[in-house]
Image (cartoon, rainbow, N blue to C red):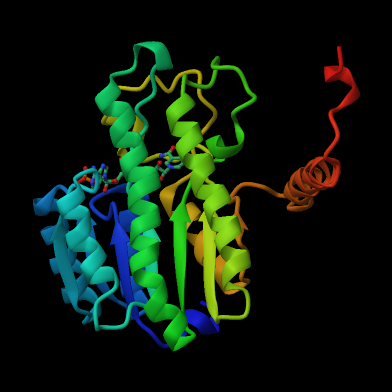
Amino acid sequence: MSDAVASGRRALITGASSGIGMVYAERLAREGYDLILVARRRDRLVDLAEKLKRGNGIAAEVVCADLTDKQALARVETLAGGDEALSLLINNAGFAGYRPFVSNDPEVIDDLVDIHVRAVARLSRAALPGMVRRRKGAIINVASLLAISAVLPPDPLPSRATYAGAKAFILAFTQALAGELEGTGVDVQACLPGRVSTEFHVAHGIDTSKLPPAMTAEDVVTASLSALSRREVVCIPALANPALFSELTDAQIKVFRNSAMQPTLAERYMT
Ligand SMILES: NC(=O)c1ccc[n+]([C@@H]2O[C@H](COP(=O)([O-])OP(=O)(O)OC[C@H]3O[C@@H](n4cnc5c(N)ncnc54)[C@H](OP(=O)(O)O)[C@@H]3O)[C@@H](O)[C@H]2O)c1
């Protein structure tokens, strides 16, 4: 764990009732963190909190909240920015909502944006002033490898325009935030797992037969916490050669600089 986090010992985890969020909770409890566990399924959270308190002697608070609901989100924002210091915020809650965009339910589109975009931004906004003031803390935002998948066709990957777009927001948001937070003592990370074996696909009846093989949630969390201690802004748990991601960002910078410094119309658009 990085110095930024080590002595705070209080973490808020969204989507802690299953999968990756539950593993973050178990891992941090073992490291002695007090926890605030957020999700909609209260029974699951209560069982987890009791188990983690008994096994690790930590404090664990359960917050039953639907993060697509503005009032419920406001309650969680109050906890993230409250008087008690928060050393680690993990924005992990999410769901797939895979479906061809033209036939997707508008409510599902709203929920995807609310949970992956609004909740991530608002909880970060709530937590950061205290972290910056204390010069200590970190935020992990769980994105997805699908954040960089937009140019791949929808087969065999799922139809995912809103999900991929929302996860791309998390990636760009975190990278830009890392620049703003440079020198403050606060670290941010976007974690981009590929397919993970959790309830994510099963609970929503998604056919996984054509999808790539799945990593365990345990391995994702191991990578993410290790990346945090190395202050990596982007963690791709299965990427063996990190230079590949640097090539991608280098190309982005090249395209950006090349066009931003050139206010004249590109020749191919001149008729
Ligand atoms: N599994 C994968 O293949 C995969 C790959 C890349 C990225 N991810 C990302 O990893 C994160 C965790 O997913 P997972 O794989 O662990 O799936 P999961 O087992 O289905 O867990 C999702 C968590 O999000 C919570 N959640 C969903 N909607 C919510 C809402 N409206 N309000 C509050 N909490 C909500 C769920 O709790 P309740 O239902 O109790 O509310 C649950 O705790 C997600 O952001 C997902 O996009 C997953």
Identify whether 39 is placed above or below 200: below
Residue shown at 20% from the left, 49% from the top:
70
Q: Position of residue 79 (x, y in %)?
A: 22, 70
The total number of labels drawn is 0
Identify whether 14 is placed above or below 186: above
Q: Quadrant of ligand 1?
A: top left
Residue shown at 77% from the left, 46% from the top:
244
Q: Position of residue 222 (x, y in %)?
A: 50, 61
Q: Residue 224 or 248: which is nearer the viewer?
A: 248
Identify whether 91 is placed above or below 3: above
Q: Residue 205 or 122: which is nearer the viewer?
A: 122
Q: Is residue 243 left or right of residue 165?
A: right
Q: Residue 77 or 36: which is nearer the viewer?
A: 77
Name the quadrant containing residue 116: top left
Name the quadrant containing residue 10: bottom left
Residue shown at 35% from the left, 11% from the top:
103
Q: Quadrant of the C terminus?
A: top right
Q: In this view, does 119 lie to the left or right of 189?
A: left
Residue at the far right: name it.
267
Q: Position of residue 96 (x, y in %)?
A: 37, 32
Q: In this view, does 123 lie to the left or right of 161?
A: left
Residue shown at 33% from the left, 28% from the top:
109
- Does residue 100 appear anywhere in the picture? no
Q: Position of residue 126 (x, y in %)?
A: 33, 67
- Does residue 224 appear anywhere in the picture? yes
